[in-house]
Image (cartoon, rainbow, N blue to C red):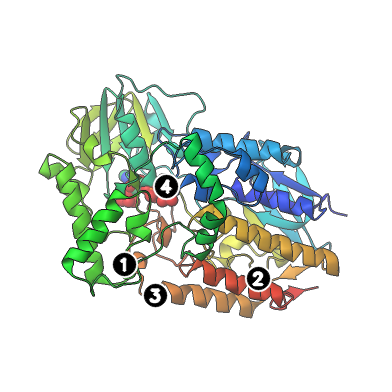
C-alpha cells in the first residue's frame, strides 16, 4: 500500500486549497513544500513593493463564508506582507500545516505501473509513495538569473526578486541597480527609488505600464465589500479572465475618436486592469485598434516624464499595448523625474559584465552596493523541467514536451497516469485564485469519483490530448500577444531551449473552459481512461 492517497507538490494557493478539498474526501494527503512556510508566490516574492494587481477582494479564497466574514483587506491591492499573513491565517484556520512537510523540495516523481502509484523523491533523498500526484508548482516559480558574465563575482549584496531575503534590506543612501523592467521590476523600482541614494535601472525592453490607483480600505468600506461578495465572485465567474473588468463589446474602430479617448481616459483613471481587460473588444486582435490605444498610453508617458529623451526610452517600440503582461504602477514614470534615478537603455549601451564592484557596460563601469535582479522566471513549463517527472515506461515529461506542452484540459498528460496539474500549461490563468478554485474542485471531483468507483488508474487519452492541444493552439491564432516574445509565449533568453515561441497558455474564455471541464465530469469522465 502507498504511504499516501495523494501527494501534492507545493503549498501555495493551489496546494493549500487542494489539500483542504482532498482531506474532505477522507484521503490521506501529504504536501511537500520547498519553502519554510505556506504561500508559494507570496512566500518567495518578498521584494519591496510586491503587491496584487487584482483587487484584493476578487483575489482571496471564496470557498469559506467564515473566512470571507473574518478577513479584512486593508488595501484595494494588497501588498505582499498582508497577503502572506492572509495565507498563513488560512493555513491556521483550516489546520493545514499538519499535512504539509516544509523544507522539502521534490527532485523526482516516477510512476510505477505495477502498483499504479507515484514514487516521489525529495532532495534529501527520502522517498514517498502515493496513488495520485498533484502538481501545484506554480506557473511563475522558477526564477532565472540573467546570462551575464561575472554574475557571481559581485562583492556587494545581490538578490533575485523571487528569492528575496526574509530580513528587510535597507536602501537608504545606497547605490542600487535594478536589472529588469517587467511587472516585478516596475513594482521594485518605484519602491526602491523612494530611499535609495542613487538608483540605476538597466532596461532591455520597456513595457506599457498603467496606473494601479491603489487605496486603503476602511472598516466601513470593507463591511460594504463583504456584503457584495456574492456579486463580486459571480462577476469573476462571468468575465473572460476572472477579473472584475469586462471588455466593452464595441470595436475601437466603430466609435468616434472622442468616444475612444473618453473610454481610455476613464479606464486610465480607474483602478486596476481596466485598460487591459475592460477595453474595446478588439484592441488585442486588431492592429489598428492596438496602435491607437498604444498611442494613447505613449502620450501619457510623454506627459508624465519630463525629459523627453527618457520618455522615448520608456515607450515600447517592439510591441503594442497589452500584448505582454501589463505592469500596474504607482508613480512609476515620475520616478524618472527624480534626480537620484537614472535609466540605462542596454540596447544602446549593453552590459558587458558584472564586476566585483558593479556593472560594466560598453561605455562605463558603475559601482553599486546592491544589485537587484528582476529578471523573471522560466515560466509555465520551467517548474516542471526542474523535477524529473517520469511516466509509463520511464517516459520523461521533458522529452514528451520538447516541442511544446501537450495536455488534456491543462490538467493531465497522456503517459502520466494519476498525475493532475494545477495551473500547468494550457489552463486558464487570469485572476489566478479564481481559476485555482475551479480547477482544484474539478480534480477533487475526479478523485471522489475514483474513490467511489474504486478506480486506481486515471489517464488522459491520446485523442483527448491531441484535441485539447489543437484547440488551445487554434484559440491562440490571431492574438497579437502570440506574435511577441514574453514569458507568456514561453520565451526566456536566459534559458537554453526557450528561444522559440510556443502556445503555452489557454487563451479562450474562463467560462468556456469551465463549461468544457464540467461536461467531462457530468459525462462520468468517460473521456479519460479509467481502470
Ligand atoms: P518578466 O515580465 O519576465 O520580466 C523580466 C525582466 O527582466 C524583463 O524586463 C526582461 O527584459 C529583463 N531581463 C531578463 N533577462 C535579462 C538580461 N539578461 N539582461 C537584461 N534584462 C533582462 O518577469 P517579472 O518577474 O517582472 O514578471 C513575471 C510575472 O510575474 C508577471 O507578468 C506577473 O504576472 C507576475 P526583456 O523583456 O526580456 O527584454
Mark 2 neighbour class, 10 Å CA radius: few under 14, some 14 to 19, many 20 or more: many
Contact (Cβ within 8 Å) of mark 4 with mark 2: no
Sequence-earlier tag: 4 or 1: 4
The residue that disc 3 covers is 477
Secondary structure type for disc 1: loop
The answer to which of 399 and 525 lies nearer the viewer is: 525
The answer to which of 531 and 147 lies nearer the viewer is: 531
Q: What residue is shown at x 84% (from left), y 53% (from top)?
A: 2
- For this orientation, the residue located farthest to the right is 1
Q: Is mark 4 within 8 Å of ligand 1?
A: yes
The residue that disc 4 covers is 53
CA–CA distance in space, label 4 to label 1: 20 Å
Residue 414: give its label.
Answer: 2
State the image coordinates of residue 205 (x, y, percent, origin top left).
27, 50
**Residue depth check, mark 4 versus mark 2: number of the one nearer the observer:** 4
Mark 4 neighbour class, 10 Å CA radius: few under 14, some 14 to 19, many 20 or more: many
Q: Is residue 64 left or right of residue 214?
A: right
Secondary structure type for disc 3: loop
State the image coordinates of residue 12 (x, y, percent, origin top left).
60, 45
- Give the total of numbered labels: 4
Secondary structure type for disc 2: loop
CA–CA distance in space, label 3 to label 2: 25 Å
Mark 1 neighbour class, 10 Å CA radius: few under 14, some 14 to 19, many 20 or more: many
State the image coordinates of residue 334 (x, y, percent, origin top left).
22, 37
- Please say whether residue 34 is visible from this viewpoint: no
Sequence-earlier tag: 3 or 2: 2
CA–CA distance in space, label 4 to label 3: 27 Å
- Please say whether residue 53 is visible from this viewpoint: yes
**Residue depth check, mark 1 versus mark 3: number of the one nearer the observer:** 1
354 w.r.t. 175: above or below: below
Q: Quadrant of residue 373?
A: top left
The residue that disc 1 covers is 280
Amino acid at each position: 500500500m502507498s504511504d499516501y492517497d495523494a501527494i501534492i507538490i507545493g503549498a501555495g494557493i493551489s496546494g493549500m486549497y487542494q489539500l483542504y478539498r482532498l482531506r474532505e474526501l477522507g484521503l490521506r494527503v501529504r504536501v511537500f513544500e520547498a519553502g519554510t512556510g505556506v504561500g508559494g508566490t507570496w512566500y518567495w516574492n518578498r521584494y519591496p513593493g510586491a503587491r496584487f494587481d487584482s483587487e484584493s477582494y476578487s483575489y482571496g479564497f471564496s470557498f469559506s463564508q467564515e473566512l470571507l466574514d473574518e478577513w479584512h483587506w486593508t488595501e484595494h491591492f494588497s501588498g505582499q506582507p498582508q497577503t502572506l499573513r492572509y495565507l498563513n491565517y488560512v493555513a491556521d484556520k483550516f489546520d493545514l500545516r499538519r499535512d504539509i512537510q516544509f523544507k522539502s523540495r521534490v527532485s523526482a516523481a516516477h510512476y510505477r505501473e505495477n502498483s499504479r502509484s507515484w514514487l516521489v523523491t525529495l532532495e534529501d533523498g527520502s522517498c514517498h509513495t502515493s496513488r495520485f500526484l498533484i502538481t501545484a508548482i506554480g506557473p511563475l516559480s522558477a526564477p532565472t538569473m540573467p546570462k551575464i558574465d561575472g554574475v557571481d563575482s559581485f562583492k556587494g549584496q545581490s538578490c533575485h526578486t523571487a528569492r528575496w531575503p526574509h530580513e528587510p534590506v535597507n536602501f537608504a543612501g545606497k547605490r542600487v541597480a535594478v536589472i529588469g523592467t517587467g511587472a516585478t521590476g516596475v513594482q521594485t523600482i518605484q519602491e526602491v527609488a523612494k530611499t535609495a541614494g542613487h538608483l540605476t535601472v538597466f532596461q532591455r525592453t520597456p513595457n506599457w505600464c498603467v496606473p494601479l490607483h491603489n487605496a486603503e480600505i476602511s472598516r466601513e468600506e470593507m463591511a460594504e465589500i463583504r456584503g457584495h461578495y456574492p456579486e463580486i465572485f459571480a462577476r469573476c465567474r462571468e468575465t473572460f479572465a476572472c477579473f472584475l473588468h469586462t471588455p466593452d463589446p464595441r470595436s475601437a474602430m466603430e466609435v468616434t475618436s472622442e468616444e475612444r479617448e473618453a473610454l481610455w481616459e476613464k479606464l486610465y483613471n480607474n483602478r486596476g486592469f481596466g485598460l487591459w481587460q475592460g477595453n474595446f473588444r478588439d484592441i488585442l486582435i486588431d492592429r489598428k485598434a492596438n496602435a491607437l490605444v498604444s498611442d494613447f498610453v505613449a502620450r501619457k508617458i510623454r506627459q508624465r516624464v519630463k525629459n523627453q529623451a527618457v520618455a522615448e526610452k520608456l515607450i515600447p517600440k517592439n510591441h503594442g499595448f497589452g500584448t505582454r503582461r501589463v505592469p500596474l504602477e504607482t508613480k512609476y514614470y515620475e520616478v524618472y523625474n527624480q534626480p537620484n534615478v537614472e535609466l540605462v537603455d542596454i540596447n544602446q549601451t549593453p552590459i558587458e559584465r558584472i564586476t566585483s564592484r558593479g556593472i560594466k557596460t560598453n561605455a562605463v563601469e558603475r559601482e553599486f552596493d546592491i544589485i537587484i535582479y528582476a529578471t523573471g522566471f522560466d515560466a509555465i513549463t520551467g517548474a516542471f523541467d526542474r523535477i524529473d517527472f517520469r511516466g509509463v515506461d520511464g517516459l520523461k515529461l521533458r522529452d514528451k514536451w520538447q516541442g511544446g506542452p501537450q495536455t488534456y484540459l491543462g490538467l493531465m498528460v497522456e503517459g502520466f497516469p494519476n498525475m493532475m496539474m494545477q495551473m500547468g500549461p494550457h489552463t486558464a490563468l487570469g485572476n489566478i485564485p479564481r481559476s485555482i478554485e475551479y480547477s482544484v474542485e474539478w480534480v477533487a471531483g475526479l478523485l471522489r469519483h475514483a474513490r467511489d468507483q474504486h478506480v486506481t488508474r486515471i489517464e488522459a487519452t491520446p485523442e483527448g490530448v491531441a484535441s485539447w492541444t489543437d484547440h488551445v493552439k487554434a484559440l491562440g491564432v490571431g492574438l497579437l500577444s502570440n506574435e511577441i516574445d514574453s514569458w507568456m509565449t514561453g520565451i526566456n533568453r536566459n534559458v537554453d531551449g526557450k528561444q522559440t515561441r510556443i502556445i503555452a497558455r489557454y487563451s479562450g474564455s474562463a467560462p468556456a473552459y469551465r463549461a468544457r471541464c464540467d461536461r467531462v465530469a457530468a459525462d462520468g469522465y468517460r473521456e479519460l481512461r479509467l481502470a
